[in-house]
């Protein structure tokens, strides 16, 4: 909700939210409310989860209460989850408008998209991220590295981001190489 991916009205139906599983009684082994429910003084049953959902809706509209409860301490970044989950979500969101999302959160979505592209292309090339460290001058023009940089530019990654990930010491040296002026 905080990232603007889902509204309070649709929270219980959002496929990546465990609340849906709790409300419908479709939990898998290990999915428990042991930490959440006692905090709110609720039972881990259908009635308790319905009350919890209502509290989430109330909290969504009460920034002062969110601050009082310390929400900013556990909800940083544009989305919480594994790198793989964020990459998948970023890919899905790339097809939609990010209306209502802060500039920083939108940047997080884009960076996850670029990172997912980088990881996929490295895998296709049979390379690993440890091969992307700082480069010696003659390594900078390796065809696979330049192809990787070209593909990252194609998905909107800025030269600065690409240079940092691919080990180019200067952004301009990458820009010149990609534009064929070397």
Image (spheres, helix red, strand yellow):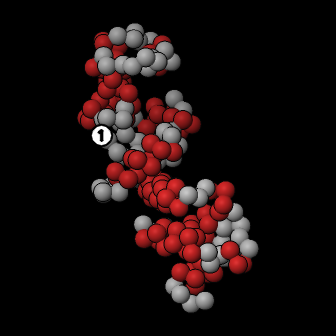
As drawn, 107 above or below 81: below
Point out residue 177 in the picture as x, y percentages from the top left corner: 58, 82
Point out residue 57 in the picture as x, y percentages from the top left corner: 33, 30
Label 1 SS: loop
**Lateral position of residue 137 relative to residue 10, left or right:** right
**Lateral position of residue 163 relative to residue 120, left or right:** right
Task: Give the residue at mark 1.
Answer: 7
As drawn, 137 above or below 20: below
Please tell me in which quadrant of the rendered image residue 16 appears: top left
**Lateral position of residue 88 relative to residue 149, left or right:** left
Which residue is painted at 30% across and 12% down in the image? 47
As drawn, 125 above or below 10: below
Point out residue 22 in the picture as x, y percentages from the top left corner: 34, 20
Point out residue 60 in the picture as x, y percentages from the top left corner: 37, 35
Which residue is painted at 56% across and 70% down in the image? 144
Mark 1 Cα within 10 Å, few/some/many (few <14, many 20+)? some
Q: Residue furthest front?
A: 126
The foreground one among 97 and 90 is: 90
Q: Is residue 131 visible?
A: yes
Q: Residue furthest bottom?
A: 181
Q: Is residue 171 visible?
A: no
Please tell me in which quadrant of the rendered image residue 27 appears: top left
Q: Residue furthest right?
A: 136
């Amino acid at each position: 909700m905080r990232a603007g991916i889902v509204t309070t009205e649709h929270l219980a139906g959002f496929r990546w939210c465990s609340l849906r599983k709790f409300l419908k009684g479709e939990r898998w082994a290990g999915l428990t409310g042991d930490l959440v429910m006692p905090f709110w003084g609720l039972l881990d049953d259908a009635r308790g989860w319905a009350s919890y959902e209502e509290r989430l809706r109330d909290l969504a509209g009460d920034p002062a209460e969110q601050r009082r409860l310390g929400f900013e301490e556990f909800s940083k970044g544009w989305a919480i989850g594994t790198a793989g989950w964020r990459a998948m979500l970023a890919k899905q969101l790339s097809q939609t408008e990010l209306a209502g999302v802060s500039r920083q959160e939108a940047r997080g979505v884009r960076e996850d998209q670029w990172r997912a592209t980088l990881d996929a292309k490295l895998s296709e090339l049979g390379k690993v991220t440890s091969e992307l460290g700082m480069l010696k001058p003659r390594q900078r023009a390796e065809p696979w590295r330049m192809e990787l940089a070209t593909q990252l530019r194609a998905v909107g990654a800025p030269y600065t981001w690409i240079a940092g990930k691919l080990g180019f010491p200067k952004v301009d040296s990458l820009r010149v190489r990609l534009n064929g002026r070397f």
